[in-house]
Image: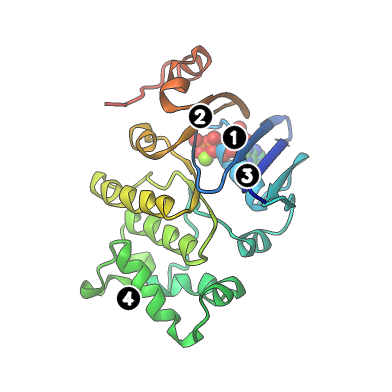
Amino acid sequence: MAGEPILKVSHLKKSFGGVLAVYDVNFELNPGEFLGIIGPNGSGKTTLVNLITGFVKPDEGEVLFRGKNITGKMPYKIAGLGISRTFQMVRLFYNLPAYKNLIIPLCSSRFKKMRGGKYGERDDVAIDLLDDMGFERDSQVPYKVAGSLPHGYLKRLDLSRALALRPEVLILDELFSGMSMSEVASTLPLIEKFNEEGLTIIMIEHRLKELFRVVDRVMVLNYGIPIASGSPDEVMESEEVKKAYLGIHIDLD
Ligand SMILES: Nc1ncnc2c1ncn2[C@@H]1O[C@H](COP(=O)(O)OP(=O)(O)OP(=O)(O)O)[C@@H](O)[C@H]1O
Ligand SMILES: [Mg+2]
């Protein structure tokens, strides 16, 4: 249906014991939109990602993907529908060669349905994808054991794993943490390119300067509650946001 949001989050709530991690979060995302989510440490950003992607079940509220209720479904089902994510703390097969970490999404029925072709080609697909992400094929980097690679490579490997699923919505949870400046500088244009090609993206990031360069819109969480939403300039002008970030250095130069 024309004009239907690709993702709709309504009244989402989650508490852990006495801690209200996410409290009444509502937002809609149109196909192809690029949303940034920011907020101080512990403001509920990762919990929100976990609620959308099925890793944590909400106490209340619902998540609709293309109008279909996906609330509380298993993570692999949600991924299979086309929502993939990266992890703030990467989870990889450290004992396998880097390219073999892409094997699960490349063996999924989603990938098979979308790309066709033979399963035997999947190693080539993995290596092509990693090469695009800066894993120099000529230097054998995709073949190295994942656990031997520097942290910035592991973050890009996690991103490649998420992309291998050919998602419609990609959620990035602090992708840039632990990356060098040059890794950030080379990864950011790739993410922009995916968005220009139609991928809907939610990006959670503490590196605001980089985030603000690419997003259409920003939502700010504080203690699990959205306190502002709008363009980067609009949200940074908000008194509530300034208060939430009081004493925290924000580098926007
Ligand atoms: N599994 C859990 N069990 C108990 N408390 C949790 C759990 N997950 C998150 N919390 C709590 O919920 C709140 C929100 O945490 P969350 O990780 O979502 O914040 P965040 O915004 O992603 O923080 P950061 O910027 O540090 O990544 C915090 O108070 C955290 O301690
Ligand atoms: Mg987090």
Q: Which mark is residue 3?
A: 3
Q: Is mark 2 within 8 Å of ligand 1?
A: yes
Label 1 sits on residue: 44
If you read the primary sequence from the N terminus, does the residue marked by circle 2 or circle 3 appear first?
3
Q: Which residue is depicted at the point 47% across and 53% down?
A: 198
Query: How many numbered marks appear?
Result: 4
- Indicate the amino acid at tag 4: Tyr
Residue 19 image position (x, y, % from top left): 68, 30
- Tell whether 151 sits left or right of 108: left
Which of the two discs, 2 and 3, sits closer to the camera? Answer: 3
Determine whether the residue tagged by mark 1 lies in a helix, strand or loop.
Answer: loop
- Indicate the amino acid at tag 3: Gly
Near-viewer residue (178 or 83): 83
| Tag 1–tag 2 contact (CB < 8 Å) | yes
If you read the primary sequence from the N terminus, does the residue marked by circle 3 or circle 1 appear first?
3
From this viewpoint, is residue 12 visible?
Answer: no
Q: How far apart are labels 1 and 2 at the CA level?
A: 8 Å
- Tell whether 16 sits left or right of 134: right
Q: Is mark 1 within 8 Å of ligand 1?
A: yes
Query: Within 10 angstroms of label 3, few (less than 14), some, or many (20 or more) residues?
Result: few
Determine whether the residue tagged by mark 2 lies in a helix, strand or loop.
Answer: loop
